[in-house]
Image: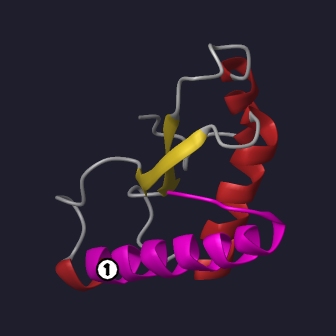
């Protein structure tokens, strides 16, 4: 599990050379900001990570860390966006072949 929503996406490329059978979980929701991500931004973050890591390497998506410091309504909004963004990504991937997250 990698907390990478707050980090430059290119940093993920260092993990590309790990054993290909190892799946990675990536943070796509930044808990350090109160702005709620759009589902489109989350889907793009997943696509970018898959492009950097290799097809099928992204196995889980999650927030960077816990939401304990955010107001409840913001945390709830970020979780809704996470689910919608994942679903958007999976819908796009299903056009190119099976995907799972």
Q: Label 1: which residue?
A: 74
Q: Is residue 40 above or below residue 101?
A: below
Q: Quadrant of the N terminus?
A: top left
Residue 35 seen in the figure: no
Q: Which residues are magenta?
A: 75-101
* Helix, strand or loop for the magenta stretch, by majority: helix
Q: Residue 56 lies in magenta, yes or no?
A: no
Place residue 39 in its image quadrant. bottom right
Name the one closer to the observer, 68 or 87. Answer: 87
Place residue 15 in its image quadrant. top right
Q: Position of residue 87 (x, y in %)?
A: 55, 77
Instruction: Tell me the crowding category of disc 1: few under 14, some 14 to 19, or many 20 or more residues within 10 angstroms, Cα based.
Output: some
Looking at the image, which residue sits at the far front?
98
| Residue at 55% from the left image edge and 47% from the top image edge | 6
Q: Residue 88 lies in magenta, yes or no?
A: yes
Q: Position of residue 72 (x, y in %)?
A: 18, 79
């Amino acid at each position: 599990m990698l907390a990478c929503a707050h980090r430059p996406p290119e940093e993920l490329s260092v993990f590309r050379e790990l054993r290909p059978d190892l799946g990675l979980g990536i943070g796509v929701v930044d808990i350090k900001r109160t702005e709620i991500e759009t589902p489109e931004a989350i889907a793009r973050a997943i696509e970018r990570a898959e492009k950097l890591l290799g097809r099928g390497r992204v196995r889980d998506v999650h927030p960077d860390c816990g939401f304990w410091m955010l107001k409840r309504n913001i945390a709830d909004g970020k979780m809704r966006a996470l689910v919608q963004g994942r679903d958007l990504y999976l819908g796009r991937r299903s056009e190119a072949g099976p995907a799972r997250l």
